[in-house]
Image (spheres, rainbow, N blue to C red):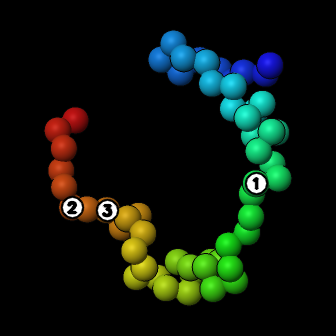
Amino acid sequence: MVQTPCFRGLHWPFREQARSHKSSVYFAEAYHQQYLAKNPQGYCGLGGTGVCLPA
């Protein structure tokens, strides 16, 4: 089994899982493609929340 690098002591066999689930991946309907390009004020949180956290 191929494993990805360690993350906090856990090894995730991501590549092996991705290979076994390849046939389960489907593209979304055309109206979902490039949603944020078509709707710049869409629901995506990339604009930030305005909440400040201490560094």
Callout 3 secondary element: loop
In the displayed structure image, the side of residue 9 where residue 1 appears, left or right: right
CA distance separating discs 2 and 3:
6 Å
| Residue at which label 3 appears | 48
For image coordinates 17% across by 38% down, the residue present is 54
Q: Earlier in the sequence, mark 1 or mark 3?
A: 1
Inspect the image, locate mark 1, and give the three-letter code of the amino acid beneath it. Answer: Ser
Query: Residues at badges 2 and 3 in contact (C-beta under 8 Å)?
Result: yes
Report which residue position mark 2 lands on: 50
In this view, the mark in front (1 or 3): 1
The amino acid marked with disc number 2 is Gly
- Residue under label 1: 24
State the SS at label 2.
loop
Dot placed on the residue nearer the N-terminal end, 2 or 1: 1
Q: Which quadrant holds the C terminus?
A: top left
Q: Is residue 51 left or right of residue 27?
A: left
